[in-house]
Image (tube, grey):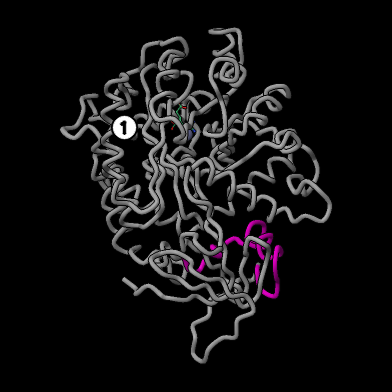
């Protein structure tokens, strides 16, 4: 462990009021206790380059990191989200708690190296391969918490309620055995999840009905009442088939159904929400719910493109998630989000909104505040009283050099094809140095062992 510094000096840093030069942050007990812009560097004082708050990653299925890149070969029929899901189910069928912990630690280390300091783990792999519970019902949640503890990433654990295989309480498939709980089982899982994260600084536990396919209206109502005020996340309207199935079941589209039958408000995070009509966009944006966008995974799975322009015009909140973890990086998600809008709208600087605004800065600010709201965590921001969770970018990176202010964010997001994150501090303690997590060697060795078994090498 590297000793915790009491001050950090940045050549340039993004403060709540904007960019400032020579910013010295004073730290104590894992928090920022003073912010000194235009500081005079002391003789021999260590200097860091570009200081930023870390972004929240609001949607992850950590275990899927182990199959990243392994589903990119064409199968016998037309490949789709649904054929990918079959492969994913077969893959997770073999994973043990040790495997899940090893893969999650790898994913979380890569998140920290990629500019994320908090992860929302949408966690549904609960049970043994035959569907029976582990002796500790929250065994897998304990493993997720252990991976967060080892890497020091902030955690919002979202234990998932999953009871059915399709709209209207359809039977689950054998591949879904490891996910299933009734409401009593879920209550035990929730209690176990709360104790699993109790020792983690800044950890939050929310609630996640998997989707309208996996929870009935009655179950959804009970889940929403269990822990009022905590984050509530749900997958919705990701695939057009889901929209068609929802229409066949209820006569309504998924987002429309949610708006009419639940009290969607600012505690809700709707993951994907890809397929919405203009009316759904306006209505949903007005509730204050966050749209949890996962642009890299949505592209990888062929989901479709989120209606970003109308959502922004309606004042909707967004955050980003790495979801399947096929590629892990804050800049990658923000870039893909903007590029999808450019490709469909045949335009440039779409999500910047108004003249003179930097696209990178607009995306970064939106994902920072929307992400923190969805995570139920403290706002990541470099000001007095905030947790000292700080990312430093490499000003010597060719995409960042000789730039200042918002041009640094644009360089990082649009122009850096190798990681530009140099250092990360969590609660004032350095966890990434020279672009690598300080425990990376041990974490990656263990990940390799797990892969060797899972892939049968
Ligand atoms: C998941 N992933 O839960 O891992 C889902 C697939 C489903 C994404 N939607 C399963 N990207 O939605 O049924
Ligand atoms: Zn998901």
Reply above or below: 136 against 174: below
Picture coordinates of residue 101, whole percent (x, y): 29, 47
Q: Which residue is mark 1?
A: 190
Q: Is residue 355 magenta?
A: no
Q: Kindly identify the residue that appears in the image at 56 percent across and 71 percent down.
A: 35
The one of 180 and 447 positioned closer to us in this rendering? 180
Residue 265 is left or right of residue 400, and the answer is left
Can you see residue 79? no
Residue 196 is left or right of residue 247, and the answer is left
- Disc 1 within 8 angstroms of ligand 1 (CB): no
Can you see residue 422? yes
The one of 186 and 399 positioned closer to us in this rendering? 186
Q: Kindly identify the residue that appears in the image at 28 percent across and 51 percent down.
A: 199
Quadrant into which the N terminus falls: bottom left
Picture coordinates of residue 299, whole percent (x, y): 59, 38
Q: Is residue 404 magenta?
A: yes
Picture coordinates of residue 114, whole percent (x, y): 50, 57
Report the magenta residues as a range.
400-424
Crowdedness near tag 1: few (<14), some (14–19) or many (≥20) residues, C-alpha within 10 Å: many
**Corner quadrant of residue 126:** top left
The mark tally for this picture is: 1
Q: Kindly identify the residue that appears in the image at 36 percent across and 54 percent down.
A: 201
Q: Residue furthest right?
A: 355
């Amino acid at each position: 462990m590297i000793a915790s510094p009491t001050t950090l000096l940045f050549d340039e840093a993004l403060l709540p009021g904007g960019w400032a030069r020579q910013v010295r942050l004073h730290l104590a007990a894992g928090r920022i206790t003073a912010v000194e812009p235009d500081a005079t560097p002391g003789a021999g004082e260590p200097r860091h380059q570009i200081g930023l708050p870390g972004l929240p990653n609001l949607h992850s299925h950590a275990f899927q990191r182990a199959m990243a890149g392994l589903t990119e070969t064409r199968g016998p029929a037309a490949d789709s989200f649904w054929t990918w899901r079959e492969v994913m189910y077969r893959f997770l069928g073999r994973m043990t708690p040790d495997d899940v912990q090893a893969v999650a630690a790898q994913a979380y280390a890569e998140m920290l190296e990629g500019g994320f300091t908090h992860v929302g783990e949408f966690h549904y792999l609960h049970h043994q391969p035959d569907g029976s519970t582990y002796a500790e019902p929250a065994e897998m949640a304990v493993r997720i918490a252990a991976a967060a503890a080892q890497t020091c990433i902030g955690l919002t654990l979202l234990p998932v309620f999953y009871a059915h295989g399709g709209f209207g309480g359809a039977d689950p498939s054998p591949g879904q055995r490891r996910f299933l709980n009734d409401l009593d089982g879920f209550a035990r899982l929730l209690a176990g999840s709360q104790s699993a994260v109790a020792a983690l600084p800044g950890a939050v536990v929310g609630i996640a009905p998997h989707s309208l396919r996996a929870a009935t209206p009655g179950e959804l109502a009970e889940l929403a009442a269990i822990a009022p005020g905590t984050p509530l996340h749900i997958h919705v309207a990701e695939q057009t088939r889901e929209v068609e199935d929802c229409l066949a079941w209820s006569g309504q589209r998924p987002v429309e159904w949610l708006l009419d039958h639940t009290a969607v408000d600012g505690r809700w995070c709707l993951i994907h929400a890809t397929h919405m009509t203009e009316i759904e966009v306006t209505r949903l944006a007005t509730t204050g719910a966050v749209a949890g966008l996962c642009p890299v995974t949505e592209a990888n799975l062929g989901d479709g493109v989120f209606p970003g322009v109308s959502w922004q015009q309606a004042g909707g909140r967004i955050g980003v998630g790495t979801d399947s973890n096929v590629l892990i990086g804050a800049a990658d998600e923000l870039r893909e989000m903007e590029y999808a809008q450019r490709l469909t709208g045949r335009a440039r600087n779409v999500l910047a909104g108004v003249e003179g605004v930097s696209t990178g800065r607009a995306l970064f600010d939106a994902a920072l505040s929307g992400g923190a709201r969805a995570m139920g965590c403290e706002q990541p921001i470099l000001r007095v009283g905030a947790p000292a969770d700080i990312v430093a970018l490499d000003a010597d990176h060719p995409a960042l050099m000789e730039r200042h202010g918002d041009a640094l964010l644009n360089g990082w997001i649009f122009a850096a094809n190798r990681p530009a994150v140099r250092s990360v501090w969590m609660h004032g303690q350095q966890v990434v140095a020279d672009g690598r997590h300080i425990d990376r060697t041990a974490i990656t060795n263990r990940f390799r062992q797990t892969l060797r078994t899972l892939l049968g090498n």
